[in-house]
Amino acid sequence: MSATALFGQLLLGLINGSFYAMLSLGLAIVFGLLAIVNAAQGAFYMLGAFFAWMLLQYVGIGYWPALILAPLGVAIFGMVMERTLLKRVYNLDHLYGLLLTLGIFQIIQGMFVYWYGTSGQPYNYPYELTGGHNLGFMFMPNYRAWVVVASLVLCFGTWYAIEKTRLGAYLRAATENPMLVRAFGINVPMLVTLSFGAGVALAGIAGVLAAPIYQVNPLMGGNIITVVFAVVVIGGFGSILGSIITGLALGVLEGLSKVFYPEASNMVIFAVMILVLMVKPVGLFGRER
Amino acid sequence: MPEPILEVARLNGWYGESHVLHGVDLKIGQGEVVTIVGRNGVGKTTTLRAIMGILRRREGSVKLFGAETIRMVPEKIAKLGVGYVPEERGIFASLTVTENLFLPPILAPGGMSVDELYTLFPNLKDRGRSQGSKLSGGEQQMLAIARVLRTGARFLILDEPTEGLAPVIVQQIGRVLETIKSKGLTVLLVEQNFRFAAGVADRHYVMESGKIIDVINRSEITEKMERLEAYLGV
Amino acid sequence: MALQVSDIGAAESPRSRSIEWIGLGVGVAVLLAVPYFVYPVFLIKLLCMALFACSFNLLIGGGGLLSFGHAAFFGGAAYIAAELAKMYGFPFELALLAGTATGAFLGLVFGLVAIRRAGLFFAMITLALAQAVYFLALRLPFTHSEDGIQAVPRGWLFGVIDLKDNLTMYYVTAAIFFLGYLLVRRVWKSPFGQVLRAIKDNQPRMISLGFPVDRYKLANFVLSAALSGLAGSLKAIALGLATLTDVDFTTSAAVVLMVLLGGLGTLMGPVVGAIISVTMDDYLAGIGIPVPVVIGVIFVFIILVFRRGIVGEVIALWQRFEASRSAPARK
């Protein structure tokens, strides 16, 4: 196995890892506030990619504006969903939230499969990022470098916003004791809706970043979400930073296993999950809720 | 009295199916410090939560600053100028002391400045960067009071502020309450420690089984001491 | 607040018991007569799914644990039974036994890993584990991945009854289903079942009373997995096919829907849910409406409006009716 191939896989692993990180970050934010697992997160990832594709296909709007518009569309869609549907199950057992979002996922994915079939639509790399650079030990495609940088910026930007800003303080406080935060005069329900929007927007923007690499396919949500769940189980829902690190690490691990043991590469994350569950059931960064 | 800050009438409250408040009546005027006293479990904390809008199922009338709030959500009630210091203090563990202090938004002008607060609560002064969970019980209580004083709230609700605290801290809190009183703020207090309550309050409402059964003014305490002791099961 | 479960374990009046016996009798009569009105192969498929749903209900209705990975037991057993029957000449009953054992074994593995968690995490862990099984099924040579195992012979029951005839196969299936249903019912009403429900309602209390709750939960999980395995093997042999669909997430989701639709924690609920679900699947596929969308809409509708499920609502109505008859009008 040549060094070029190794680094190529590592890079792909890093990219996948950053998608895992962004999706599980979005899940963690929502879970912290609502104790609900948004099983539709994969659908928002797919919607992000599809909105970008639709913007190009039907309105002629290209990649760069789509990078902002598509996640915005996803966020609006998600917030409407939260206000109209999800809100009704907050008082119930949290499993109902999971089931509800699962049902919504089936609807969204099902409709898109119905409209667009199961083969992917191609989406072109933005012109500015075609080509690449020869780094000596590997060839670095510009677009892939961009995805890694953008994802890391988004992830750590989100971390910073949550841990270091005033708004983040509101969020962290609301996660601990929402009633008390309301008693201070803060509109927590609105905060929850906006955070939900942010959480799904993260998935949406990951979708746009993924579109040129993986094609735009109605099934892309379902394919990624089971791995993301495994990532979340491994990392635990304990910390924002934990989600990011776990997602990235597992993506890289998966990439490495593709190099050395390709038949088992799908399984490696699940194997890690089983191991973690036997040793530390709450997850690597988990805290009992 | 001129328009009361708080006027509670026929307040009934439920935790789920459990009927806990059976028609509470209270009135507090501007600048007064009033306590609700009574044994454990009679509904004192529940009353405060009902006033704050935190208790979901409540009926009757609660008027704050003249406005009917029985149907309002907590954030709206707070915005009328109410500051809440809960029994468990509610210091957020995942926030620093400074973040905790600045969390409640400013509700009205006239709140205490940060310098004033650090003068009143010197133990908080250099703890800004510490995590909320690292404070002692007394420090947490100070912080819980300080943060609502910053907001400019004119009516403060304090639930068991001296619970579990050392006598030295209890005295400090007493001095804090004197300062609050001197600023013309109105206070509703729930206190198990009657001696403390007697030291600061103008009036005491005695609660039993979810109802107010007696009112004792400051001037009447000595003559009604026996009765009080019976109520409180001392 | 736990998942909304209709309480069957509650005290039974002599009246409700006789209604039950009548119900069982009617059920047997229906099972005997129905193949003359409905295509037997369709009924076989339906009964396998109904058995699958009943076994799933043991876990979610009885134990209060939502698993998203039951397809692993159903499909895993399907593959093993099919392979043994086709390539190794296993007779019908032994293939079923092997499939059931496969379900039990996988259930034990899953259970050992997942049982310490509950609620959401349990669901996600079972989902991920089932996905692992899916990948195995995709890769292992004997499953022939996309093609699946086809043309599985039915063979003879006990070496005596030729199962080639669809009607015969149906009656054997119905008998197995009925036995499975009775087993679930027995477990449900037994002390074991009561302990499980008590654990579901208040685990800390049961722990403090000295019950080895993890063992109970694990035993229930394995039982549920084993019966799912039975259902899967039966389906594979009777319908002659074991495919990737049997192990994938849509099957796990389908059984969740069946039980929710019919009524969590009721005995007949899963059967009703299976009947509706399988029939609807068939009908919709025929007229070209996207099935997952309809399933999703029904899911959403049930969760928002209809949490007790069909049988659950019927039972609730019945209980209200009974209460208003026996008690004088109250405020």
Image (cartoon, coloured by chain):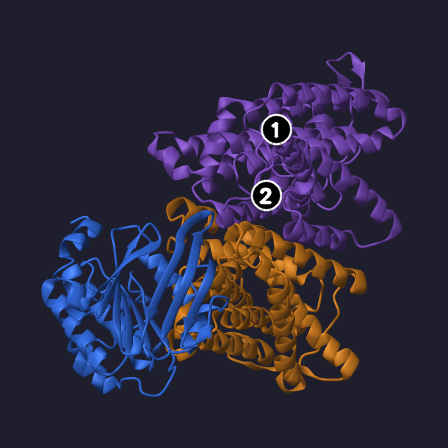
Mark drawn on residue C69:
2
The one nearer the camera, C27 or B67, is B67
Mark drawn on residue A215:
none
Tell me what hue chain B is rendered in: blue
Tell me what hue chain A is rendered in: orange
The one nearer the camera, A43 or C95, is A43
Mark drawn on residue C326:
1
Q: Badge 2: how crowded within 10 Å, few (<14), some, or many (20+)?
A: many
Q: Nearer the viewer, mark 2 or mark 1?
A: 1
Q: Secondary structure under badge 2?
A: loop
Whole-percent x, y for residue A31 in the image = 49, 60
Q: B173 left or right of A127? A: left
Residue A287's quadrant in the figure?
bottom left
Q: Return the disc, 2 or 1, that comes first in the chain's sequence.
A: 2
Badge 2 and badge 1 both on one subunit: yes
Q: Is residue C256 visible?
A: yes
Whole-percent x, y for residue B166 in the image = 12, 62
